Amino acid sequence: LLPSSASGASVVAIDNKIEQAMDLVKNHLMYAVREEVEVLKEQIKELLEKNSQLERENSLLKTLASPEQLEKFQSRLPAEVLCPEEQSPGMAAPAQHSGGSAV
């Protein structure tokens, strides 16, 4: 009986060690994911602030620019970059929508 109970105890000990190792890996992964989430949250915050700043700057520049300057600038941009409300009346809207919706 001693050899079989000793092997049973060793199986339980191995199972416990495996469970401990799995818990350690799980805890490490959860920590790493939490750290990455915090970094991404900070990046999102910074990007939202930058986007807001650029939108304000763009609005100000549009307000200060003459219609001729706006037209000259828009003529240099690819059609996909322009939003429908920013397109000049002479441009065909369907061609520009098909280019931007492929993604």
Image: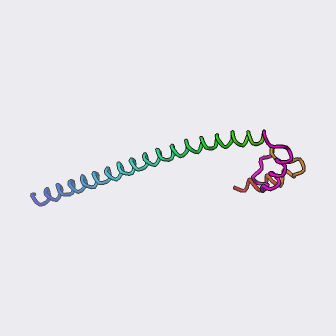
Q: How is the image coloured?
A: rainbow
* Left or right: 64 as drawn, with respect to 48: right
Q: What's the residue at 55%, 44% (across, down)?
A: 44
Q: What's the residue at 56%, 43% (across, down)?
A: 46
- Percent position (x, y) of residue 3? 11, 60
Quarter of the figure with the C terminus = bottom right
Q: Nearer the viewer, residue 73 or 17?
A: 73
Q: Is residue 67 magenta?
A: yes
* Left or right: 48 as drawn, with respect to 32: right
- Percent position (x, y) of residue 91? 87, 52
Tell me which corner region of the image, top left, top right, bottom left or bottom right, holds residue 66: top right
User: Is residue 62 in view?
Assistant: yes
* Left or right: 1 as drawn, with respect to 92: left
Tell me which corner region of the image, top left, top right, bottom left or bottom right, holds residue 50: top right
User: Is residue 87 in view?
Assistant: no
- Percent position (x, y) of residue 34? 43, 45
Residue segment shown in magenta: 63-84
Q: Nearer the viewer, residue 69 or 41?
A: 69
Quarter of the figure with the N terminus = bottom left
Q: Is residue 8 above or below residue 55?
A: below
Q: What's the residue at 20%, 54% (across, down)?
A: 13
Q: Nearer the viewer, residue 39 or 56?
A: 56
Q: What's the residue at 34%, 53% (across, down)?
A: 25
Q: Is residue 42 magenta?
A: no
Q: Nearer the viewer, residue 81 or 70?
A: 70
